[in-house]
Amino acid sequence: MPVEILMPALDPSMSEARLVKWLKVEGDPVSIGEPIVEIETDKAVVEIEAEVKGTFGKALVKEGCDVAVNAVIGLILTEGEEIKYLNSSASAVQVKAVPPPFNYEAADTVETTILPPRKSARDDGNRIFVSPLARRLAARSGLDLSKISGSGPNGRIIKCDIERVLAIKDDKSTAMPQRNIEPRSDDFAYLPIYQAVRNSSLRSTIARRLTESSQFIPHYFLSIDCELDKSLEMRKELNSACSIDDKLSLNDIIVRAAAIALQKVPDVNVAWTEEAILHFAQVDISVAVAIKGGLITPVIRNAGGKGLAQISREVKNLAAKATEGKLLPEEYKGGTFTISNLGMFGIKSFTSIINPPQGAILSIGAGEQRPVVKDGKLGIANVMSVTLAADHRCIDGAVGAEFLGVFKSLIEMPVAMLL
C-alpha cells in the first residue's frame, strides 16, 4: 500500500499549515531525508523530508491550501508499486484518508484589479452575490445572508463577512468587547482601484498577536539616552583583529548589554499569567528581524552566558535563515525579552508593542552626534535613544528604570561586560 505523507505538527500549538509548494512531481524518485514539500507555518516556510524510499505517487492537496495537521497530503509508492495502482485503487484511499481541502483561492479570490464595490450584495433585490465558501459557512451557522453586507468585489459576501458576523455574535454572548473590526462595504465605496493581496499566515499571526497585546497588556514606556563612543571604540578595536565574516555589529553589543542587564535586574526577565508571575532562570533574547511580508523574532538562547563573538555568529546565522524563511519553531519561539532595532533606518526613537507572553521589549534608535554637557563643558558625543515598553502587571516602573540604568552603564562602559 502507498505510504501516506501527513501534514506535520511542528509545535504543540500548531493546528494547521499552508502547503506552499510540492518539490516532487508524479513519478519522481524519492530518497529518505529528501525534501518533498514546503509548508508555511505562522512564522516560516519549512521543507518536509521523506521518511521512506520510493516513488512520488500523488499530491492530494493543491499548493496554496490550508490543511489541518495530521491530514494526508500526498502518497509515496514503495518498491514494487506502480503509478497505475493509484489510478485504480488509490483514489479510494485519497477520499477516505483526507477529503480534498476546500480551495480558498477559487472560492474567495479577488481579481488582481478590483473596482470599488457597491453597497449591496444584491443586483435586483432578489439575487445575493456570495462566494461558495461564505454560503456554506452561513448555512452551517444559521445566518441570514440577506442581512449581511458584503465587502468583496461588487459587494459580494465572502468568508471574512461571515466571520465578522459570527465574531459579533460571540462577543455579545460573552459580554466582551469586539476584538476584530472588519471594514464595511461602505468604507470601500469611494476608494480608487486597488489590488487585494491575500494575507499570509505570518501576517495574520502578527496582526492577531499585536492586536491582543495592545488591547490587553497595560504598556508603559521609559526612554533613556546612551553615549556610544566607548562601545564604538571597543567594536573598532575588536574588529581590527577579526575576519570580515566575524566582525561585530553595534547590535551585537546591545544584545550582550541587555542580556547582562537582565541578569542584574531579573525582575524584568519575567512574564505575566493570571495565576503567577513567571521568573525565568535563563535570558533568551528575541531579536526582531524584518523579512518579506512581516517581522520575525529569532531567539538567542542563554544570551547572558555567551560572549560577543558567539552572539554575533548566532545573530547572523538566524537572520539569514529568517530572510530565507527557513527558521524552525524552536529557533523563533520561547524568548523571554525582545530587542527591536530601527537605528539602521535613521529612526531616532520609537516605541514597540510587547511580544506576548514576554513582559518587555527594548526599542533601539539610531546613534548620532549630539551636543552633551560633561563637567560643565559643552561637547559632542555619539548618542542613541532607547525606549523600554513594559507590562505594568508584572514589571513596576522603578524596576524598568533600574534595568535601563544598568543597560546604559554597560553601553557607556562596555569593559564592564567582562566582569
Image (spheres, rainbow, N blue to C red):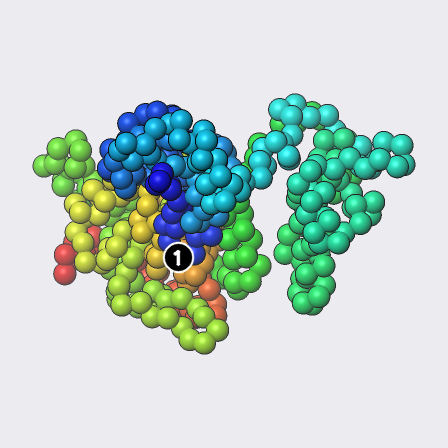
Q: Secondary structure at mark 1?
A: loop
- Left or right: residue 190 compared with residue 319: right
- Left or right: residue 276 compared with residue 379: right
- State whether residue 159 is above or below residue 415: above
Q: In the displayed image of the protein, which residue is found farthest to the left?
A: 241
Q: Position of residue 86 (x, y in %)?
A: 42, 32
Q: Residue at x 49, y 62 (%)?
A: 220
Tell which of 186 and 326 is nearer to you. 326
Q: Position of residue 188 (x, y in %)?
A: 73, 35
Question: Disc 1 designates what residue?
Answer: 12
* Residue 372 in view in this figure: no
Image quarter where the N terminus lies is top left
Count every numbered label the image shows and give the total: 1
- State whether residue 108 is above or below residue 356: above
- Left or right: residue 252 compared with residue 345: left
Image quarter where the C terminus lies is bottom left
Q: Position of residue 61 (x, y in %)?
A: 48, 36
Q: Residue at x 38, y 47 (%)?
A: 8
Tell which of 36 and 257 is nearer to you. 36
Q: Residue at x 63, y 56 (%)?
A: 179
Q: Residue at x 73, y 25 (%)?
A: 115
Tell which of 119 and 123 is nearer to you. 123
- Left or right: residue 179 compared with residue 325: right
Q: In the displayed image of the protein, which residue is found farthest to the bottom?
A: 275
Tell which of 38 and 72 is nearer to you. 72
Neighbourhood count class around disc 1 (C-alpha, 10 Å): few under 14, some 14–19, many 20 upward: few
- State whether residue 383 is above or below residue 156: below
* Residue 301 in view in this figure: yes
Tell me the kind of residue under disc 1. Pro
